[in-house]
Each structure stands twice: as structure tokens, then as C-alpha cells.
Amino acid sequence: MRVAAVADVHSPKYLEEFRNSLSRVETPDVLLLAGDMINFGRSAEYQNIINTIDSILGADVPVAACFGNEEFIETRDNILELTKARISFLDGESIIIKNGELEIGLVGAPAPRDVIDASKGLNHQDIRGIFETRASLLSNLMKDVASKADQTVLLMHYSPLSESPNDKNVSEYSWWISEIIKEVQPNLVIHGHLHGAKMLRTSIGRTKIFNVAFPATNMVTEIML
């Protein structure tokens, strides 16, 4: 199965570059959007993303996505309404995509931004408890999907690796996700968010991890499963 993936296309400059890069991609079996495809919660900008995808790849290529920190919580209902006919948003949810005899299970990790935004009213123990609960639910979901599909893909905006010592809450969230990956060992993890990263590919055990943030890659990432 041919997978194309991208994240962090949230400025007019990147949108045009995204369009040019997408035109050079071999038509994928599925396109994954790993968050921050719009700027400052402007949900209407998703129509530009959909138009770009459909004009280049056609309207039949399946598209799955997760939320990033630019898809503000208060605008997500609008995003879902606008995109429901074209994009499958996975926020702590999963879908299975069939390609011939191969079944790929896609799992979308919930972004922690709602916890971080509310962190002034939460103490560290509260945040830890929320992350532990989400990690447990995500782990169970991934195990369930892995039992049904031939391969499992985790789609998330934030990196499953510690990102910055100054971004304490996200780093803790990333730690929990990395522990899930060690336990469940999905085939592939797709993430964005790290615009300035030099290392775009790594692994945890047998799990391959790709940073597909457009400012870091300068291209739509193509992966064969």
C-alpha cells in the first residue's frame, strides 16, 4: 500500500508549495494529514486543502486526519462539518482501509492541546491522570485494531518522542505515547509539529516513525507499507 502523508501546511506559502509537491506524488492508496493544515483555527481554510487534494489526486483517494494545535478546540465542530464528506478525522478513533487483500488499521491519537490550554486550572497530578487515562484508552484501541488489521498505523500531530524540555506537558504526553508504542509496536507512526527537525525518520523497536511536518520535509512524504 502506498501512503502519502503531510502536516503543518498552515500558511499561504506552504499551501502553494504543498500543491506543487502533491503534483509530483504518485497517486497514493491513502493520504494522511497529521494536523495543523490550517492557521489559527480558521476552519474555512480546509476547503482549500480539499480542493487542492481533489484537483490533483482526484476525489476517490481516501483521506484521514488528526487534529493539531492549530485546529483549535472551539473550531473543531466546524471543521468536522465542513470536511465530513471528504476527510475522516480520527480523534481517539480508528478506521480500517482495505487495499486488495491488505487491511490497514489507522488510529488517530487525540491531541493534548485541550489539557495544555486548561493547565492553569490543573495541577501536575491532574494532567498526569488525564494523560494516563488517554494512554490506556489509546493502547486498548491500538491493540483492538492490530488484532483485526494486517498493519497498524498511528496518526498523531505531536511527536511520540520528547520534544522540548520547555514544553513540559507535551513532553509528558509524548512519553506516554512512546510507552504505548513500545508495548503495542504498530508498524508505522506518522506525526508532524517539529518544523525544524533534522532527523525525519527514526524507530522505536520495529515501529517506523516519520516526521511529515512540511516545513521540515519540504515535500509530501511517500511511504510504502
Image (spheres, helix red, strand yellow):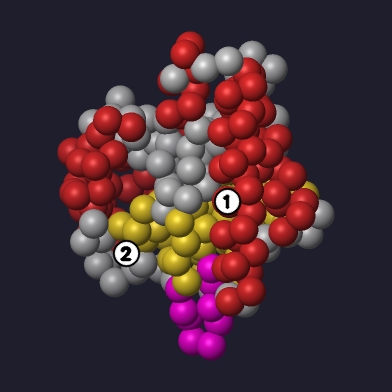
Q: Is residue 194 visible?
A: yes
Q: Amino acid at mark 2?
A: Leu
Question: Is 67 rendered above or below residue 225?
Answer: above
Quadrant in which the N terminus is drawn:
bottom right
Q: Residue at x 25, y 34 (%)?
A: 75
The local secondary structure at tag 1 comes to helix
Q: Which residues are magenta?
A: 97-105
SS assignment at label 2: helix
Could you tell me how far apart the alpha carbons at marks 2 and 1 are, in whole angstroms? 34 Å
Residue 224 visible here: no
- Examine the rendered structure and indicate whether residue 140 appears above or below residue 80: below
Percent x, y of residue 64: 40, 58
With 179 as the anchor, is 212 left or right in this view?
A: left
Q: Residue at x 48, y 80 (%)?
A: 99
**Magenta stretch: helix, strand or loop mostly:** strand
**Marking on residue 57:** 2
Disc nearest the viewer among 2 and 1: 1
Instruction: Say which quarter of the image contains residue 188.
Output: bottom right
Badge 1 amino acid: Leu
- Asked whether 98 falls inside the magenta stretch, the response is yes
Taking 63 as reference, is 48 above or below it? above
Point out residue 139 in the picture as x, y percentages from the top left corner.
Answer: 64, 54
Residue at screen point 33% across, 32% down: 73
Name the residue tied to disc 1.
Answer: 137
What residue is drawn where x is 62% and y is 58%? 140
Name the quadrant of the C terminus.
bottom right
